[in-house]
Amino acid sequence: MFNKKMITTSVFVTALAMPSVGCAQSKSQAPDPEYDAATMLTPAQVASDVALAEEAYERIHPGYTRYTDAETLKEAWAAIAAKAATEKGMTIGDFYLEIQNVLTLIRCDHTKAELPNQLAKERDVNPVYLPLRWTLIEDRAIVTIPAGTGLSRGDEILAIDGRPIAEMIAEVAPLIPVDGYTEWSRRSGISESLEFRGGAIDHFGALLWDIKPSATVTVTNAAGTKRDIVVERIIHKKWRALSKLAADAPAANFKDAIGFERLGSQSAYLKVDTFVNYRDPVKPKELFDPIFDTLRDERRENLILDLRQNGGGSNDAQQALTSYLFDKPVKLATDARVKTLNHKGLEDYLWTWDKRAINPSALGFSRNDDGSYSLRAFVENLIKPVKPAKNGFRGKLIVLTSDSNSSASATLIALLKGNDRAVLVGEKTGGSPDGNTGGLQFTLTVPESQIRMRIPMIRYFNDLKGFETGQGIAPDKVVPLTVDAFRAGFDPALEAAKALFE
């Protein structure tokens, strides 16, 4: 299930001053039937699940028609049922892919489908993952963790089982949701993703292609020597463990995500790889205070803040960092809206970490002219001003950015740029500088297939000028990572940032 504090949590429901509401046991909590990805659904079962999903998204999702018109979405939902009718049924695996295709049309990074529990469990039984890690650099698949496969860090993957890697990427990329029109940000989910178990190639590929226990990987090295390597695929649990083999692997939890070092006598470097602070929570100030005390006490004038690995996370970590970077109160959002308070008829299929949100009290909201509801300031931290910390940094700030930035990290980067507080160096980000849809999330489980889908409840609004709707945040100085630089162990964005202090 979706973790109860995933993405950008708030005090939304817990402070709504509403009574606990009992509800019947959700049908989504019923035990999963014994099926696999090849199990057939009847046309009637597909049509039933589609109708429920369409109704739930149309009623609840606050950004449902933000980027795609209602008629296009209606036709996309209908096409799934029509295909099942024409083909006299549909496998659960194919149905999952069809659902994910529709959800990407909403263009919200927090909107996605999860595998049914039974199919997800099979990923730790059936070996479908390559026993290595790789990433996309300059649209090339570059090995980052060879893990004893006979490959080397920096080798380029050309094909897997004879299928060109470029064709595989083109097939799975449309299944990765992005905010707005930030198509370039799909790259970060192609090879590695916690959201899509192992990254899009492995996660969706196991349903798209005939995956064998052994795989032939065609690679070339820096010298241009081409060869084939045969590897044994591994289960998801072992694939996750590969990250421990790399010293520079991004941290999964906020408590492990912070790195700090001095640069000469006047500068410093601070990296924050994630704001995720729900799996192993800590108090953010306890981590940040010693760092910013050092910057103040040593009178350091320049700071490089590296957010390139940061895809977002928890509000408390994001807000805490914000407080150290400004000398005046700032708001991370000016408004937070939900589309409806009425979930009648959907209750049995919705789950969230506070069941009271399924039947919320109107006391915590004010009604808008368009029929939506704004959360009142006393229940939503993000629309309250973040007060500057007494030991905050007041010097020159450079922020390193990448296409992995989204959600809470993109919001912070937009705030820094919108207030002319920082110089941005690196790559264009994902995310929505004018405000994302996230916050409290529902998980909808459709009963026939048991496919689970995430529906964000809140849309945030930012009052920042100079950003193009749906286009992420452009750095002031574009410095992409190249394959040659990666192989040489050179970090061009970091070196470009250091040069700005000279």
Image (spheres, rainbow, N blue to C red):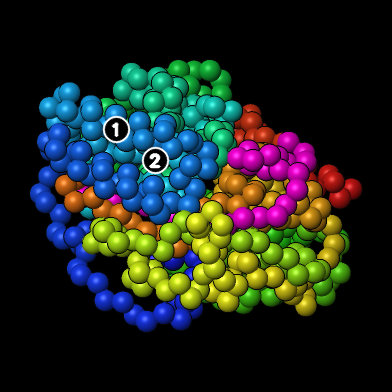
Are discs 2 and 1 less than 8 Å apart at CB? Answer: no
Can you identify the residue that label 1 sits on? 78
User: Measuring 70% from the left and 55% from the top, which residue is drawn there?
Assistant: 463
Coordinates of residue 232 in the picture (x, y in percent): 27, 35
Residue pointed to by mark 2: 103
* Neighbours of disc 2 within 10 Å: few (<14), some (14-19), many (20+): many
**Disc 1 packing (10 Å; few <14; some 14–19; many ≥20):** some
Q: Is residue 464 magenta?
A: yes
Q: Is residue 121 above or below residue 23?
A: above
Q: From the viewer's side, name the closer residue of 19 and 310.
A: 19
Question: Between disc 2 and disc 1, whose residue precedes?
Answer: 1
Q: Is residue 81 left or right of residue 464?
A: left
Mark 1 secondary-structure assignment? helix
**Residue 375 visible from this viewpoint:** no
Count all numbered tags in the image, as a single digit: 2
Disc 2 to disc 1, how far (Cα)? 13 Å
Q: Which residues are magenta?
A: 450-478
- Residue flagged by tag 1: what amino acid is it? Ala
The foreground one among 332 and 388 is 332
Q: Quadrant of the N terminus?
A: bottom left
- Disc 2 secondary structure class: helix
What amino acid does circle 2 point to? Answer: Leu
Between 134 and 64, the one nearer to me in the picture:
64
The residue lying at 15 percent from left, 34 percent from top is 43
Q: Is residue 350 above or below residue 433?
A: below
As for residue 45 lying within the magenta part, the answer is no
Specify whether residue 285 is in view: yes
Snapshot quadrant of residue 130: top left
Which quadrant of the structure image shows residue 376?
bottom right
